[in-house]
Image (cartoon, rainbow, N blue to C red):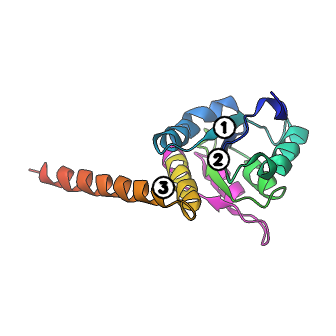
Amino acid sequence: MANGGIKLNQQVSVVMGSISDWETMKPAATILADFGIKFEKKVISAHRMPAEMFSFAQQAADRGIKVIIAGAGGAAHLPGMLAANTTLPVIGVPVQTHALNGMDSLLSIVQMPAGVPVATTAIGVAGAKNAALLAIEILGIENASLIAKLVEFRQSQHDAALESGEKLD
């Protein structure tokens, strides 16, 4: 397979700095799959694989990628360095760390200099889920069927919340 083993025709890249980030990022992949979004998943370390990271970011649009979701912990340079090397939207997911409970990741991702934006979500699994939903919203700008699925998804969340309130004693 060309392109370093990455499939063509994917719309979203779900990338992370290390395999240990997969537990956080897996729910993003699940949501994308549930919505029928073609995506790829890959470990790309900003610190241990800089050449591959630069190449990945610079070639993503040419491969048909529309949005990159990047999870990283600690110094969390991956989302920002990807954003610096592509004009595609990059959504950063701060991975919860042991040392600082994810605050280090959050601050590393959210404090991008003006001119290199990274959309940043909450720390951990909630952030990964919201990153997938934000990617779907971005793709939905030109895809009415995705918007319809989002409306249905939000209605199901509403209904579940309403039902849960009825269980109160």
Image side of residue 107 versus residue 56, left or right:
left
The label on residue 40 is 1
The label on residue 12 is 2
Of the image marks 2 and 1, the number of the one nearer the N terminus:
2
Residue 61 vertical placement versus 111 (above, below): above
- Residue drawn at point x = 71 percent, y = 55 percent: 108
Closest to the observer, 42 or 33: 33
Q: Position of residue 92 (x, y in %)?
A: 65, 53
Per the image, label 2 sits on a secondary structure element best described as strand
Residue 74 vertical placement versus 48 (above, below): below
Of the image marks 3 and 1, the number of the one nearer the N terminus:
1
Q: How many marks?
A: 3
Tell me if label 2 and label 1 are in contact, CB under 8 Å: yes
Residue on which the image places disc 3 = 146
Residue 115 lies within the magenta run:
yes
Q: Amino acid at mark 3?
A: Leu
- Residue drawn at point x = 78 percent, y = 29 percent: 5
Quadrant including the N terminus: top right
Q: Amino acid at mark 1?
A: Glu
The image quadrant that residue 16 belongs to is top right
Image side of residue 17 versus residue 46, left or right:
left
Q: Which residue of the protein is positioned furthest toward the left in this rendering?
A: 169
- Residue drawn at point x = 64 percent, y = 30 percent: 20
Distance from label 3 to label 1 (Cα)? 19 Å
Distance from label 3 to label 2 (Cα)? 14 Å
Q: Which residues are magenta?
A: 100-126
Residue 75 lies within the magenta run:
no
Q: Position of residue 89 (x, y in %)?
A: 69, 59
Image side of residue 14 versus residue 160, left or right:
right
Per the image, label 3 sits on a secondary structure element best described as helix
Q: Which residue of the protein is positioned furthest toward the bottom in this rendering?
A: 114
